[in-house]
Amino acid sequence: MILRDFETQSFGVVVLSSVTAAAIGRAAFGSAAFLHLPGFGVVSGLEYPLYALLGALAAVMGVVFIRVLYGAEDLGDRLWRGPEWLRPAAGGILLGALLIALPQMYGVGYPVLERAVEGHYVAGLLVLLLVGKVVATSLTMSIGGSGGVFAPSLFMGAMLGSAYGLGVHGAFPHLTASAGAYGLVGMGAVFAASARAPITAVLIIYELTGEYSIILPLMLAIVAATALSARLSPDTIYTLKLRRRGIDLQRRTRPLLADLSVSDAMGPAPEPVSADAPFSVLLDRFAAGEGGALPVLDGAERLVGVIAPADLEAIMDDEDPGQVTAADIAHTPPRVHAEDPLDAAIQALGRADEAGLPVVGGEGDGTVVGWIGQNEVMRLYRRRLEEAGR
């Protein structure tokens, strides 16, 4: 989903509108699938890791598409020096030359997509069409043209998957399905990598093709593509467009804390303990109620880790806990720096399930310069509310 959340009310509206549209569409045009493709299936268990690898390649392709698309827009803005009304015409000449060289780029491309999945193209042409669609789509958007990215992402996925399928089927002809099966899965994987909408990708591919026999490898590749693309790029092809216009959906839930850094919220760190502190000292510190966690420093005052009450409880059953030092039981928390965005620190707190995190200096020497936890964030939020007069 573009808004990156899931609420019952919004989900109900989406389901109701989808069911209504599907019912009207099938009543008017019938229930046949939009794309008429041959039947596919899973030939052997070897194909599942191959489909997962296709998902990884689709993630890279999706991120490349995002970067090239908006990079072309920026490049066009920097290079164009003429009047804006003439820009589409000048770009249209370049686009027309590309269409003469690759007529398969003309239009939405569904007929070409079908032929690719049906196995009518060789691997070299598939790769050429993949690159051509990236260039054609990016050029169209950079000259001020209007167009979507849904159909191009399906096209790219079909070309990528079919080329990949030709390779794996040539290597393992008796253990893999035909290249078209990989082309079909690639369609969903590249769209999922670009839009980061895995459920939508699964449903759309099934709705377009009516092909249920490869639903498991389809889901596997889509999940792999979505997870890896999230690691490679924080933005989707839709959210990056909004962020370039000043709308940051990732921070919409905490507008009062937007554009703040960790240094704005952090407080003083708890009194640290030395790495060689014995178990009895740690027990006394927590028994005195000195917070939910303690930073552990070495002799050079560098952070070794953090000790929480749960770390002590884990070794209380040892026959001789007195031989245990702070360095033995300290765990390594996520690294948070004073200049990091506050939103990133809040997410790190949630993922790590920590009571608080030490804030280290930006010099990389491991020096603890502060502490941030839920209390520090709430104090800052309350202060911002008072400043806003709420």
Image: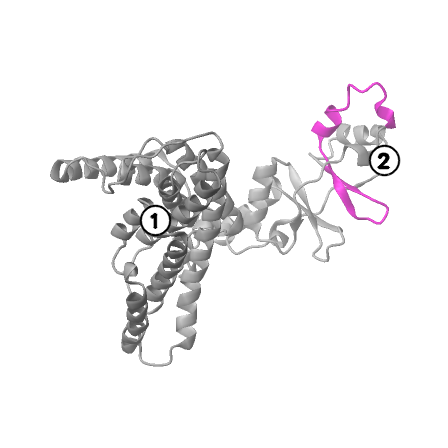
Mark 2 crowd level (few <14, some 14–19, many ≥20, 10 Å Cα): some
At mark 1, the secondary structure is helix
Q: Is residue 235 visible?
A: no
The quadrant in which residue 103 appears is bottom left
Dot label at residue 53: none
Q: Is residue 340 above or below residue 185?
A: below
Q: Is residue 298 covered in magenta?
A: yes
Q: Which residue is mark 1?
A: 154
Residue farthest to the bottom?
82
Inspect the image, locate mark 2, and give the three-letter code of the amino acid beneath it: Ala
Residue found at x 43% / y 71%:
75
In which image quadrant can residue 101 be found? bottom left
Seen in the picture, residue 137 relative to 294 is either above or below; the reply is below
**CA–CA distance in space, label 2 to label 1:** 59 Å
**Does 167 appear in magenta?**
no
Quarter occupied by residue 12: top left
The span picked out in magenta is 294-323
Judging from the image, what secondary structure is the residue with disc 2 in? loop
Residue 66 place in picture, x, y as percent: 43, 56
| Coordinates of residue 353 in the picture (x, y in percent) | 60, 35
Q: Is residue 217 visible?
A: yes
> Furthest-left residue in view?
28
* Label whose residue precedes the other's in the sequence (2 or 1): 1
Vertical comparison of 89 with 187: above or below = below
Q: Which residue is at a point 26% across and 61% down the rendered structure image?
A: 106
Mark 2 sits on what residue?
Answer: 277
Q: Residue at x 65, y 43 (%)?
A: 334
Q: Looking at the image, which residue is at 70% across and 28% down?
A: 310
Label pair 2/1, CB-CB below 8 angstroms: no
Crowding at label 1, few (<14), some or many (≥20) Cα neighbours within 10 Å? Answer: many
Q: Position of residue 139 (x, y in %)?
A: 35, 66
